Image: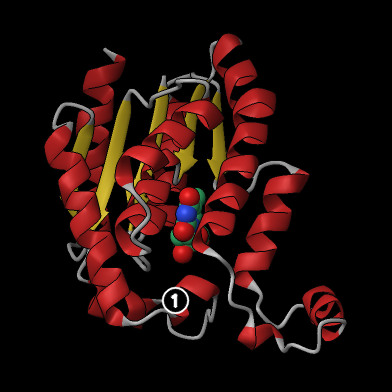
């Protein structure tokens, strides 16, 4: 079984991923907890690029072109391929082998993040992003996607100070991301399970467990 978590900034995914992992483990299943981009050296490299605009490595690289890292203006398509290359590595080297071993895989973000952020957020063509997602994942689709829905003004307040690339985007960008998630979930209501991420952490945990334990049978 392959479960993904999705949502905007500060939606509370990471703690729910941990809690769900513990509940599933307690039932005697083997569980793999992953985060995108990440889970492989390439993925971690992409993540550090996103999460650390003050990185010394980046500063050194950009000084060669006399640009500051804050002035980096990454092309949206180049950004898309960074996420997709990290994903191809993770799917082929980690997720598929784990699923083949019969493990339950829980991934904090997956291809829906790219549709929401690079597609709806950055404005890349949705059908094109879907095709590229499909290539990178080799057609792998989550059995269940838990979407934690939080208004961006609340989510961004929760993550204040993290200062990564996406958090420095304006409110309008994050509104588009949120609307994108709503569109995606309405297109696939069976796969998506939407929860109000402003609700109490334990309440959310219990709703997620209710749904997942039903799927586990
Ligand atoms: P987070 O999961 O810790 O919030 O950080 C990941 C950031 O990367 C988040 O701002 C969303 C962004 N992201 C994309 O823009 N596209 C993607 O495909 C993925 C996986 C993440």
| Rendering coords of residue 130 (x, y %) | 37, 36
Compared with residue 54, is residue 29 higher up or lower down, i.e. above or below? above
x and y percentages locating residue 125 in the rendered image: 34, 49
Q: In the rendered view, does 38 fall on the left or right side of 5?
A: right
Give the image location of residue 189, x and y in percent.
13, 32
Residue at the (63%, 87%) spot, across then down: 70
- Judging depth in this view, the residue of 24 and 6 nearest the camera is 6
Q: For residue 170, what is the image quadrant?
A: bottom left
Q: Is residue 37 visible?
A: no
Residue depicted at x 58% and y 26% = 95
Q: Is mark 1 within 8 Å of ligand 1?
A: yes
Which quarter shows the C terminus?
top left
Residue 51: % across, % down? 61, 70
Query: In the image, is residue 97 above or below residue 179?
Result: above
Foreground pick, 132 / 26: 132
**Colouring rule applied to residues:** secondary structure
How packed mark 1 is, by other alpha carbons closer than 10 Å (few <14, some 14-19, many 20 or more), is many
Residue at the disc numbered 1: 167
Choose top left, top right, bottom left or bottom right for residue 180: bottom left
Give the side of residue 57 with respect to residue 73, left or right. Answer: right
Vertical placement of residue 185 versus 96, above or below:
below
Q: Residue at x 62, y 51 (%)?
A: 82
Q: Is residue 163 or residue 135 the one in the foreground?
A: 135
State the SS at label 1: helix
Q: At x 16% / y 50%, what residue is drawn? A: 182
| 183 sits left or right of 121 in the view | left
Q: Is residue 68 visible?
A: yes
Q: Is residue 153 left or right of residue 57?
A: left
Q: How many numbered badges does the structure rendering display? A: 1
């Amino acid at each position: 079984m392959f479960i993904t978590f999705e949502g905007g900034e500060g939606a509370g995914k990471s703690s729910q991923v941990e809690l769900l992992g513990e509940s599933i483990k307690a039932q005697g299943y083997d569980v793999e907890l992953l985060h995108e981009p990440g889970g492989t050296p390439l993925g971690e490299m992409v993540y550090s690029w996103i999460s650390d605009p003050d990185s010394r490595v980046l500063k050194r690289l950009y000084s060669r072109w006399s640009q500051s890292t804050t002035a980096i203006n990454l092309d949206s398509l180049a950004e898309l391929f960074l996420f997709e290359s990290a994903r191809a590595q993770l799917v082929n080297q980690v997720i598929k082998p784990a699923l083949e071993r019969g493990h339950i895989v829980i991934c904090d973000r997956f291809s829906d993040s790219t549709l929401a952020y690079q597609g709806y957020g950055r404005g890349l063509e949705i059908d094109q992003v879907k095709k590229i997602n499909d290539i990178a994942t080799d057609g792998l689709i989550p059995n269940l996607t838990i979407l934690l829905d939080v208004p961006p003004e609340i989510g961004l307040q929760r993550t204040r100070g993290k200062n990564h690339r996406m958090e420095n985007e304006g409110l309008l960008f994050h509104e588009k991301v949120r609307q994108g998630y709503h569109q995606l979930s309405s297109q696939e209501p069976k796969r998506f399970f939407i929860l109000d991420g402003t609700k109490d952490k334990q309440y959310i945990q219990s709703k997620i467990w209710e749904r997942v334990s039903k799927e586990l049978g």
